[in-house]
Amino acid sequence: MKRNKVDIITLGCSKNLVDSEQLMRQFTANGYVIEHDPPTITGEIVVVNTCGFIGDAQEESINMILELGEAKKKGKIGQLYVMGCLSERFLKELEKEIPEVDHFYGKFNWKELLSDIGKSYYRDLSAERILTTPNHYAYLKISEGCNRTCSYCSIPIMTGKYQSRSIEDIEQEVRILVEQGVKEFQMIAQDLTYYGLDIYKQLTLPKLIERISDIKGVEWIRLHYGYPARFPYDLLRVMRERENVCKYLDIALQHISNNMLKQMRRNITKEETYALLERIREEVPGIHLRTTLMVGHPGETESDFEELVEFIKKIRFERMGAFAYSHEKGTYSYKNYNDEISPDNKQERLDYIMRVQERISSEINEQKLDKTFRVIIDKEEDDFYIGRTEFDSPEVDPEVLVTKEKTLNVGTFYNVKINNTDAFDLYGSAMES
């Protein structure tokens, strides 16, 4: 165990990562040495930031806590604290079942951890973070919570109602990050497109993006987690007109059959979904769409699944993820539907649509052969520099593997000609500047 050292482990989504980064800044202000997701956990203080979304994520979080509980018993670590969505959702059960944890905090009261250990929370540093990402990009969380009532989703149970941050607050954070060298911002929220309705009484995402776009030093803005119903169409004008707003939109659609959209309580129809996607592609030529789809929701028939497959083939999403339905306690589905589709059937459907998408992704990548793209370099490896185009978000999207014929700098943009492709990645060479 190392004195005056804090190890922070983040599980789950990038929204959790932002919370961890804010907590790390507070610990450094209090004189601690910080490590994030270290290979060996040896801290005097260890904090686990948990995910509670679906069963697999919950299991990962619980296993990590149990493992650290054993390490604490053996004296390998000191105090053990748990925060985040899992403890927000299952606080009493966790306190009873895992007494090795010194204290559990929820999604929003983690600031109390500092006072509980006799340290200060510095409010003047609330907009500052210790980045866990490469220095040239950061995640920017513009809100908390969600007002949607999707049948399967436990997130509103944990995060509560939608709470937008003010435009001024977000701008301040962006300016601080730009001064630190950040060039690229991944805009995140449980639902970006709802932004502003609670505090400004209108959908304000287009205005927010324009304001951030105007800040000198912001090179790329990428949008994650839009919602299809009541889509703020003026956003498309902003994406089309602003060069530093990436032609990229992550919009979770979940399904396409009217039967399933109704069962899922998505507040949109098949016909409206097709019209939305057509308009997005028409108004923002060249845009790359990322979506997430779900299989195995209660009531999903073979006919519904076939409609979903046909939808994937017709729309040809540039980026697509999918997951199998999880019967989560407290959700509308849990209270009103039976989890009637077998795990094997869910997995078969999931595997099938991902095979369909792999072929589509391969064909889309092939269309980029011999073309030149602006690429930001994220890291250097033995054989290649690893970068991304404006159409690629970190961690989840394809990468560009750039040959090492020239010396390139991490965090710098280069024009890269694509020489080869596969289903998941592009291969290219940096052009003369």
Image: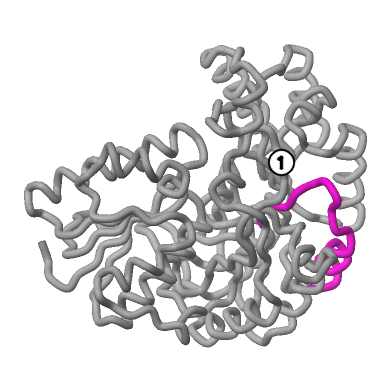
Q: How is the image coloured?
A: one colour
**Residue farthest to the left, as pictured:** 74
408 lies left or right of 293: left
* Quadrant in the rendering for residue 220: bottom right
Q: Is residue 226 magenta?
A: yes
Q: Place residue 278 in its image quadrant.
A: top right
Kindly identify which residue carries mark 1: 149
Left or right: 254 as drawn, with respect to 89? right
Residue 256 in view of the camera: yes
| Residue 408 in view | no
Residue at 66 percent across and 39 percent down: it is: 292
Amino acid at pointer 1 = Thr
- Name the side, left or right, on which 204 lies relative to 29: right
Name the image quarter holding the N terminus: bottom left
**Residue shown at 52%/16% (left/top)?**
343
Structural crowding at the residue carrying mark 1, measured as other residues with C-alpha within 10 Å and reported as few (<14), some (14–19) or many (≥20): some
Q: Is residue 239 magenta?
A: yes
Number of numbered tags placed on the structure image? 1
Residue at figure coordinates x 82%, y 25% from the top left: 257
- Bounds of the magenta span? 224-242
| Quarter of the figure that contains the C terminus | bottom right
Q: Depth check: 218 or 262 in front?
A: 262
Q: Residue 326 location, x and y as percent?
A: 55, 28
Residue 218 drawn at (x, y percent): 65, 79
Secondary structure at numbered mark 1? loop
Q: Position of residue 40 (x, y in %)?
A: 19, 55
Residue 278 position (above or below residue 350): below
Q: Is residue 389 left or right of residue 243?
A: left
- Indicate whether 115 appears above or below 190: below
Residue at 80%, 46% in the rendered image? 228
In this rendered view, identify the residue nearer to me: 414 or 336: 336
Between 2 and 40, which is closer to the camera in this rendering?
Answer: 2
